Image (spheres, helix red, strand yellow):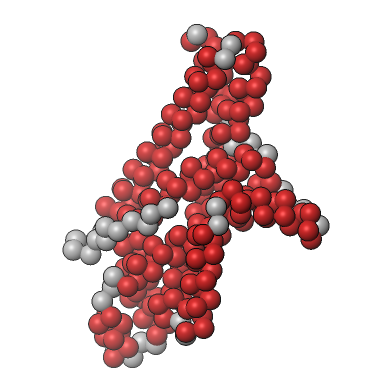
Amino acid sequence: MSVILGSIGPLIVKGVPTTILMTLGLLGTGLLLGFPIAFAQVYGYRPLRWFCRAYEQTFRGIPALVLILLFHSGLARSFHILLPAFTSALIALGLRSSAYQSQIFRGAIQAISQGQMMAARSIGMSKFQAIRHIILPQAFRLSIPPWSNEFSSVLKDTSLASAIGVVELAKEGTLIMTRIQYALGAEWILIIWIVVALIYLVLTYAGNRSLAFLEDRVRIPGFEIRGRVER
């Protein structure tokens, strides 16, 4: 059994780099879009706030798998826009993550006292300067604890990309299962998925510990935020 696991393990691990790369890409996409959306909801004009709220509710309300199929199959068949499977999943899940991250950042911004903005304006700072130098650094610190929850959710969402052929961790497990189930027996199906699940647990734990370390490094005592955005 150990010999078989030793040969199967490296094959499963082949999907880990794609899973990590997609996770980082989704978090980066969500960060780049989520922060501006959050600031627009707090400081923008009313039409812009309405648009951002509609954006947020739309991408939070559509199931992740439906979004992936919409961008991959829907665009290809309706508008003849052919995107690689990885790109389709990155766009779909990245937009969805941005909707959740905008909530995280909006909560962090609103947790900062309005008096700080007023004080910054009173000493001659423009609104943009106050946001950049006063609000943004604090919002970043306050966002880290709930952002770790988003990391865990995004990491698990990458498994949905296997539905359109992205060979990440879950897809690699499926491919191995189809190769060996007849040669080794059906009981190995359970073992394969246990190994896949353990790898996800290790990745989730490592990511959360890294974010906890970052939180400790930048934390200002008395300015923590404990909220979580449920998914």
As displayed, is residue 73 above or below residue 129? above
As displayed, is residue 3 above or below residue 34? above
Name the spot of residue 60 as percent of width and height, x first: 50, 59
Residue shown at the point (23%, 64%) measured from the top left: 223
Kindly indicate the quadrant of the structure image that contains residue 13. top right
- Is 128 on the left or on the right of 80, as rendered? left
The foreground one among 93 and 142 is: 93
- Is 180 on the left or on the right of 224, as rendered? right
Residue shown at the point (66%, 19%) measured from the top left: 179
As displayed, is residue 29 above or below residue 206? below
Kindly indicate the quadrant of the structure image that contains residue 62. bottom right
Outermost residue, left direction? 222
Name the spot of residue 115 as percent of width and height, x first: 25, 82
Name the spot of residue 122 as percent of width and height, x first: 29, 91
Residue shown at the point (36%, 44%) measured from the top left: 208
Is residue 106 at least partly visible in the picture?
yes
As displayed, is residue 95 above or below residue 156? below
The foreground one among 164 and 138 is: 164
